[in-house]
Amino acid sequence: MDEKKYAKLEKEISPKRPLMRNIIFAFLTGGTICLVGQFVSLFYMTYFDFTQQTASNPTVATMIFFAMLLTGFGLYKKIAQFGGAGSAVPITGFGNAVISAAIEHKTEGYVLGVGGNMFKLAGSVILFGVFSAFIVALIKTILVKFGVVSW
């Protein structure tokens, strides 16, 4: 069988992906996660007298905690199956990645299993996030020093 016949056969046999459905579900899932984050932020601003700027850190921590809790109970996997890429909102996706690795390697013990594997995926995210922040701060400092921009 030549390549053209094989490609045609593959196209006929392969199931069609519901692209529009996947896009809508990803949008709804990501939007719902962000909506929950907004409510958490408003909660901190209303009941704990945070400003919009200072409420961001506890909101991030709370959203990571929610994602870890949902992952621990096996619910985040169901959300990801429904919403696909929409569940990979950076904050909750980070929490899910950390706790998933910890759960997966729990049988190897707490030190070598959980502790050694917990940040395998998330460690690279943290590393490059910190490095990128350093580079941006360095560029900003240089630009401010030479009067190109003022902050």
Image (tube, helix red, strand yellow):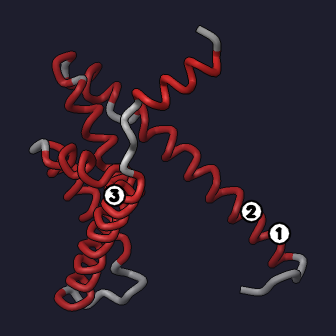
- Can you give x and y, in whole percent of width and height, for residue 124 in the image? 51, 39
Distance between the Cα atoms at labels 2 and 3? Answer: 43 Å
Can you say whether 109 is above or below 72 in the image? above
Can you say whether 11 is above or below 146 in the image? above
**Disc number lying in front (3 or 1):** 3
Q: Quadrant of residue 72?
A: top left
**Disc number lying in front (2 or 3):** 3
What residue is pinned by disc 1?
142
- Can you give x and y, in whole percent of width and height, for residue 78 in the image? 18, 46
Q: Quadrant of residue 30?
A: bottom left
Secondary structure beneath disc 3? helix
Q: In front here: 93 or 142?
A: 93
Numbered tag placed on residue 21 in the rendering? 3
Q: At 71% from the left edge and 86% from the top edge, which residue is drawn? A: 151
Distance between the Cα atoms at labels 2 and 1? Answer: 6 Å
What residue is pinned by disc 2?
138
What's under tag 1, amino acid-wise?
Answer: Ile
What's under tag 3, amino acid-wise?
Answer: Arg
Q: Earlier in the sequence, mark 3 or mark 1?
A: 3
Secondary structure beneath disc 1? helix
Q: Is residue 89 visible?
A: no
Q: Earlier in the sequence, mark 2 or mark 3?
A: 3
Q: Residues within 10 Å of mark 3 (few under 14, many from 20)?
A: few
Q: Quarter holding the N terminus? A: top right
Instruction: Determine whether label 2 and label 1 are within 8 Å by CB.
Output: yes
- Can you give x and y, in whole percent of width and height, for residue 74 in the image? 13, 42
Horizontally, residue 94 falls left or right of residue 48, namely right
Instruction: Determine whether label 2 and label 3 are within 8 Å by CB.
Output: no
